[in-house]
C-alpha cells in the first residue's frame, strides 16, 4: 500500500516508463534502507539486553562464594567460547548490514541525481556505486581483526574486574568506617538523650520550687497590701476630718480677706490721689527739663562743630609735619647711598690714589 501511495503521489501528471522505473526504484531503496536500519537497531538492542548477568551471592555466605570460584571457572571458559562465536557472528552481521545500507544509499543518491539532471546524457555509468561496492568488500583478515579486538576487550574486561575488586574492597573499608561512625553517633545520641532527660527533670524541679517560692512571696505581698489598705483607710478618715476643718478655716479666712480688701481699696484710693498730684508736679518739672535740654543741645552742637574744625586743622598740620620728616629721611638715605657708591667705586673726592712706588720696591725684593 505504501508503494501504491508513493506511485499515486509521483504520477500527477502521468509519467513516462523511465520516470516510473526510477520512482519505483527509489521507493524500494528507501524501504530497504529503513528495514535494514530497523533490523540492525533491533539486533543491537537484543545483544544489549541478552548479555549474561553475574549471579549475586548473599553477604552472609562469603565462604561459599570463595569455594565456588574454582568450580565455576571451567564452565565460564566454555560459555566464553560460545559467546565469542556468537559475538563474531553478530559483528559480521552488523558489518554486512552497514555495507548493504551504504550501497543502497549510494544507489539512491545516484538515482536522485539521474532524476534531477534531465538535460544530461541518459546513458550514465554507475562508477560511484561500483567504487563503493569495491571499497566495502570484506577483507580477508577481517576475522583476525575481530579476534584481536575481542582479545583487547578481554584484557580490558580483566582490568575492569581488578578495578571493580579494588573498589569493592575500598567500599567495604568505607562501610566499616561509616559503621564505626554510626556507632559513635548512636552512643553520643544516647548520652545527649540522657542529658536532656536529666536537664528536663532539673528544669521541672526548678519550676516547682519557683512556683512554691512565688506562692510564698505572693502571700507575703498580699498581707503587706492588706496592711497598706488598712493604713490608707485610716489616713483617708484623718484627711476627711482635716478637710472639714480646712473648710471652716477657709470660710473664716475669706471673710477676713474681704474686710482687708475693702480697707486696702480705701487706702489705694487715698494713695492714688497723692500719686496723681505728685505725677502732675513731675510732669511740669519734666517740661522744664526738656526746654533746658534743647538749649544744651544747641550749645553742644556749636561746641562740637568747633572741636571738629580744630581737630581737622591739627590733623592737617600733623600730616604736613610727617610729610616733611619723610622727605628729609628720604634725602638723607639717598645722600648716604650716593656717598657709599662714590666711596666703593672711587669717584670724585674719594678717588683712590695709585701705589706705583710700593709696587717697584716689592719687585726689587
Image (cartoon, helix red, strand yellow):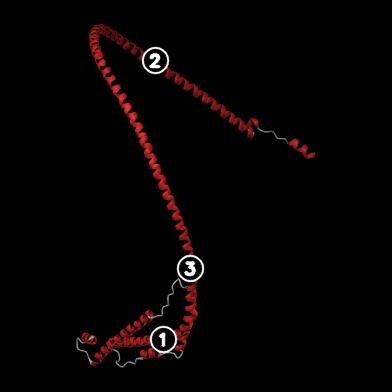
The answer to whether mark 3 and mark 1 are in CB contact below 8 A is: no
Residues at marks 2 and 3, CA–CA distance in whole angstroms: 127 Å
Name the quadrant containing residue 119: bottom left
Helix, strand or loop status at disc 2: helix
Q: Which residue is mark 1?
A: 86
Q: Residue at x 43, y 18 (%)?
A: 311
Q: Which mark is residue 18?
A: none
Q: In the drawing, does residue 337 fall left or right of residue 167?
A: right
The answer, for residue 158, to whether it is visible in the render is no
Q: Which of marks 3 and 2 precedes in the sequence?
A: 3
Q: In the drawing, does residue 320 fall left or right of residue 44?
A: right
Picture coordinates of residue 190, whole percent (x, y): 44, 55
Q: Which residue is mark 3?
A: 172
Q: Residue at x 61, y 30 (%)?
A: 339
Task: Give the label, 2 or 1, closer to the camera.
Answer: 1
Q: In the drawing, does residue 149 fall left or right of residue 254?
A: right
Picture coordinates of residue 270, whole percent (x, y): 24, 6
The answer to whether mark 2 and mark 1 are in CB contact below 8 A is: no
The answer, for residue 313, to whether it is visible in the render is yes
Helix, strand or loop status at disc 3: helix
Q: Say which quadrant the N terminus sits in.
A: bottom left
Q: Which residue is mark 2?
A: 306
Q: Which of marks 1 and 3 precedes in the sequence?
A: 1
Amino acid at each position: 500500500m505504501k508503494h501504491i501511495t508513493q506511485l499515486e503521489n509521483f504520477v500527477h501528471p502521468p509519467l513516462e516508463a523511465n520516470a516510473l522505473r526510477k520512482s519505483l526504484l527509489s521507493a524500494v531503496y528507501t524501504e530497504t534502507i529503513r528495514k535494514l536500519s530497523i533490523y540492525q537497531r533491533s539486533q543491537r538492542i537484543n545483544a544489549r539486553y541478552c548479555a549474561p548477568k553475574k549471579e549475586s551471592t548473599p553477604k552472609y555466605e562469603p565462604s561459599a562464594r570463595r569455594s565456588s570460584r574454582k568450580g565455576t571457572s571451567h564452565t565460564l571458559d566454555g560459555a566464553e567460547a560460545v559467546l565469542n562465536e556468537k559475538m563474531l557472528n553478530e559483528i559480521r552481521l552488523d558489518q554486512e548490514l552497514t555495507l548493504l545500507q551504504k550501497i543502497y544509499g549510494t544507489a539512491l543518491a545516484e538515482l536522485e541525481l539521474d532524476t534531477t539532471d534531465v538535460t544530461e546524457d541518459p546513458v550514465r555509468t554507475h562508477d560511484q556505486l561500483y567504487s563503493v561496492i569495491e571499497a566495502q568488500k570484506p577483507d580477508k583478515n577481517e576475522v583476525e581483526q575481530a579476534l584481536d579486538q575481542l582479545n583487547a576487550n578481554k584484557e580490558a574486561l580483566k582490568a575492569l574486574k581488578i578495578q571493580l575488586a579494588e573498589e569493592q574492597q575500598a567500599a567495604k573499608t568505607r562501610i566499616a568506617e561509616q559503621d564505626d561512625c554510626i556507632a559513635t553517633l548512636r552512643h553520643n545520641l544516647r548520652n545527649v538523650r540522657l542529658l536532656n532527660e536529666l536537664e528536663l527533670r532539673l528544669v521541672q524541679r526548678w519550676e516547682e520550687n519557683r512556683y512554691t517560692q512565688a506562692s510564698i512571696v505572693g502571700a507575703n505581698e498580699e498581707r503587706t497590701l492588706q496592711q497598706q489598705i488598712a493604713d490608707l483607710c485610716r489616713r483617708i478618715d484623718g484627711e476627711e476630718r482635716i478637710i472639714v476643718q480646712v473648710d471652716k478655716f477657709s470660710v473664716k479666712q475669706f471673710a477676713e480677706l474681704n474686710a482687708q480688701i475693702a480697707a486696702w481699696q480705701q487706702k489705694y484710693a487715698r494713695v492714688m490721689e497723692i500719686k496723681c498730684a505728685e505725677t502732675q508736679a513731675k510732669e511740669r518739672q519734666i517740661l522744664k527739663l526738656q526746654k533746658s535740654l534743647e538749649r544744651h543741645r544747641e550749645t553742644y552742637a556749636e561746641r562740637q562743630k568747633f572741636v571738629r574744625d580744630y581737630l581737622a586743622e591739627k590733623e592737617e598740620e600733623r600730616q604736613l609735619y610727617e610729610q616733611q620728616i619723610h622727605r628729609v629721611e628720604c634725602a638723607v638715605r639717598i645722600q648716604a647711598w650716593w656717598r657709599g657708591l662714590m666711596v666703593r667705586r672711587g669717584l670724585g673726592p674719594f678717588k683712590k690714589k695709585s701705589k706705583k712706588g710700593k709696587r717697584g720696591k716689592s719687585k726689587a725684593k
